[in-house]
Amino acid sequence: MNVSASGQKRLVIVGATGMVGGYALRYALDHPAVGRVTVIGRRKLGISHPKLKEVLHQDFADCAALADPLSGQDAAVFCLGTYTGSVPDAELRKITVGYTIEFARVLHGSSPEAAFSFLSGNGADQTGRSRMPFARYKGEAENALLAAGFPRVYIFRPAYIYPVKPRLEPNFTYRLLRAIYPAFRMLFPNQVIPADGLARAMVDVASRETGERGGLVLENRDIRAMAEARPSESIIGHGGQRTLL
């Protein structure tokens, strides 16, 4: 398939074995604007699809070997990450900041005009003053991406990501939030986002045609509006954000 001739996009997804990345993959494979999906990960997905290309890569601290498969990409959806408390602090920073910066470096060298959708998190602090390591590290990764030279960078800061399908929750807090989700969603609608809706928004903004350039931070309220809108609607970000769609 000649993707460029058809006008469809080449999309690369990192973190497709995770919750949000998995939904992003399934949505991208069905997306009419996406002609090829390259998934980069440490293990095989175990699925087959005419749009899908898998690239196995073990060490995200060194992505030099990905220069060729990352060539000619139109957009990236980066969902690689881990939960606070699941790894030591040094490993958390390595995964959150180091892996992101290294992948972005190689992607920009191979596809300098690619758009970048990044899964950050609620409370990410670009000033580096937060007492929470996760917030500081996500903020550090955001700053690096915004300075990397990509024409479009979309920073997604979801609050509680509802898994949609039952799963083994990583800790007690997530088990509690899942148990009280119906009430929590009713009382605090802007503090929750379904995983599939978040994934759709990340793929949609990265793969759409637009002449805009620059970076855009999307808080949970903005992501909800995008996920709930019809494709033809325009979504105006809150807090002075510019038009998204």
Image (cartoon, grey):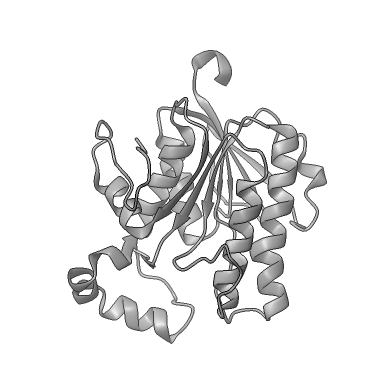
Query: Does the image show residue 76?
Result: yes
* Residue 87 in the image: above or below residue 27: below
Give the image location of residue 70, x and y in percent. 70, 36
Point 28% across, 80% down: residue: 179
| Residue 42, position as x, y percentages in the image | 69, 56
Identify the residue at the far bottom of this view: 172
On screen, residue 100 above or below 134 = above
Q: Quadrant of the N terminus?
A: top right
187 vs 41, nearest the viewer? 187
**Identity of the residue drawn at 24% across and 34% down:** 233
Taking depth in this image into account, of 88 and 56 the one nearest to the observer is: 88
Looking at this view, name the residue that lies furthest to the top: 5
- Inspect this view and state whether residue 42 appears: no
Q: Percent from the top left, x then y, of residue 190?
A: 28, 63
Say how many tags the image has. 0
Q: In which quadrant is the C terminus drawn?
A: top left
Position of 143 with respect to 210 (left or right) is right
Is 197 on the left or on the right of 25, as rendered? left
Residue placed most toward the observer, 64 or 149: 149
| Res. 205 image quadrant | top left
In the rendered image of this protein, does residue 199 appear above or below residue 231? below
Q: Quadrant of residue 90?
A: bottom right
Residue at image location 54% in from the left, 51% down from the top: 118
Residue in the image at 43% along x and 27% along y: 33
Q: Position of residue 44 (x, y in %)?
A: 63, 52
Asked where in the image residue 98 lies, by quadrant, the reply is bottom right
